[in-house]
Image: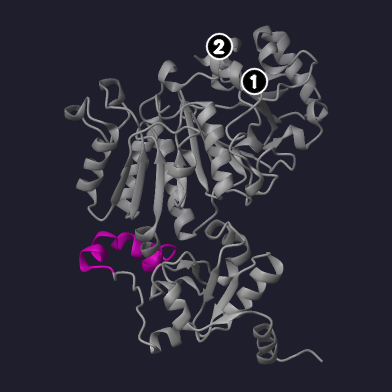
Amino acid sequence: MSPSGAEFIRQIKAGITEIDPAAVHELIGDGAAIVDVRETEEFAAGHLPGARHVPRSYLESRIEGIVPDRGQRVILYCASGQRSALAAHTLEHDLGYSDVASMTGGITLWKDRGYEVDVPKAMSAEQRDRYSRHILIPEIGETGQRKLLESRVLLLGAGGLGSPTALYLAAAGVGTLGIVDNDVVDLSNLQRQVIHSTERIGVAKVDSAEQTIKALNPDVEVVKYRTRIDASNIMEIIEGWDVIVDGVDNFPTRYLLNDASVRLRIPVVSASILGFDGQLSVFAPYVGPCYRCLFPVPPPAELAPSCGANGVLGVLPGTMGLLQATEVVKLIVGAGDPVIGRLLLYDALAATLTEVKVPRDPQCPICSRDPEDITDEEMGVFPDYEAFCAAAG
Amino acid sequence: MATIKIPPVLRASVGGEREVTAPGSSVREVLEGLVSAHPATGTQLFGNGGELNRYVNVYLNDEDVRVLDGLETAVGEGDVLVILPAMAGGAAQLS
């Protein structure tokens, strides 16, 4: 006869390691990953200091993003110690984590012992007013707005695409916006790069963007990277962000970003523009295709003009950048169908939007493999890379 | 006649058109019809062995022909072929 639910949990608990809240308290800040497996609303109401959140229903698909090293010590907890016991069983027996424990009595016992709990700041009256039109939409609501306020979005570029994306994400209350850009504002940028202004010509774009963002919404923390993304810094820069917005103008960086983001399992909202045409897709590692599934090799340099050399309708990066911002918000609040496994083609002159399907490539040189198997040496590399870069100058 | 959507980088090769039509009952025949009307598109679409260049995606309606029957995929009247090379334009001079 099958065991009762209570008996099943008792059996599971007998086969895992449990740890007392007092021992967990000693371990905080000591290199152990503390993971809260409760639902989003429960986590938002208060959690252990420094705890990361992976709802048990997403445990298998998300834990590697939080704890990539299966040898790292992992402490799981829930409300009372039952869900975390089941989760610990899964991590240890199905996913191969070697040092997993479930906290006895969950956060309830933790609080009874008088230990500290981090309670995310309740929204202020001003925030409720500022975000009231979001809170009124059921798909976002207060929960979604909190997620936005706690989210971290990295923008590669504060240029044509990055300008409108940054403005609207800041307005939407994305808590932390990272901006990577090494450039200064130039007069020829201002036909489309609306986050900058005439009086800031010559100012670093990251500083100019920060000024505009802060003026629009002081809730937003801006993290500035005045640098160029390359193989030496990409892993360090992109690690820890929830979503990356890609508006880079060249293929080597685009492939590098793809490979690094697959390795770190960070979704990338990607757009590109040329003339009157735009493309948009979301590359969610191991959920849908990656950029290499779509374009395994770049075109030769003569077929790959950048918009800097070829011109672009000034409004177009606005259109495409705001489609990117929309996808970012959807990913963060978990609403709707993101553009995963699809590519949208916008033709501004014809005013048409065409959609094509993008399947995952089972032979993809990057995302058909486990992320830990992707080496530093192969990131961003593609056949004829040297020739491509030489031809592109 | 199938309709072919021409991407920005190939428009100069077809006299600036955004869409052209070409006869043919397979993807190969339609694309060869395009090349015969606009020879400059030939080297951009096809490699030396007569296969599609790997950096060009071709969609029949919304499906990548590589997951159908490739160049031999049947094309009907009123079908739309989308030719799509990768574009990288974005934040100019980022890197």
Q: Residue at (35%, 48%) from the top-left corner?
A: A177
Instruction: Count neighbours of disc 1 (C-alpha within 10 A) and say few if under 14, some if 14 to 19, many if 20 or more.
Output: few
Residue B17 visible at all: no
Secondary-structure class at tag 1: loop
Is the residue A184 above or below the residue A67 in the image? above
| Furthest residue toward left | A199
Is the residue A219 above or below the residue B70 in the image? below
Mark 1 belongs to which subunit? A
- Mark 1 highlights which residue? A384
Q: Residue at (19%, 27%) from the top-left corner?
A: A198
Quadrant of the snapshot with the C terminus of chain B = top left
Residue A22 position in % (x across, y down): 44, 83
Q: Identify residue type, mark 1.
A: Asp
- Asked which quadrant contains residue A11, the reply is bottom right
Instruction: Count neighbours of disc 2 (C-alpha within 10 A) and say few if under 14, some if 14 to 19, many if 20 or more.
Output: some
- Mark 2 highlights which residue? B12
Mark 2 belongs to which subunit? B
From the viewer's side, name the closer residue of A22 and B70: A22
| Alpha carbons under labels 1 and 2: distance apart | 26 Å
From the viewer's side, name the closer residue of A166 and A23: A23
Range shown magenta: A123-144
Q: Residue at (50%, 73%) from the top-left corner?
A: A39
Is the residue A120 above or below the residue A312 in the image? below
Q: Residue at (64%, 20%) from the top-left corner?
A: A384
Residue B75 position in % (x across, y down): 78, 29
Quadrant of the snapshot with the N terminus of chain B = top right
Residue A291 visible at all: yes
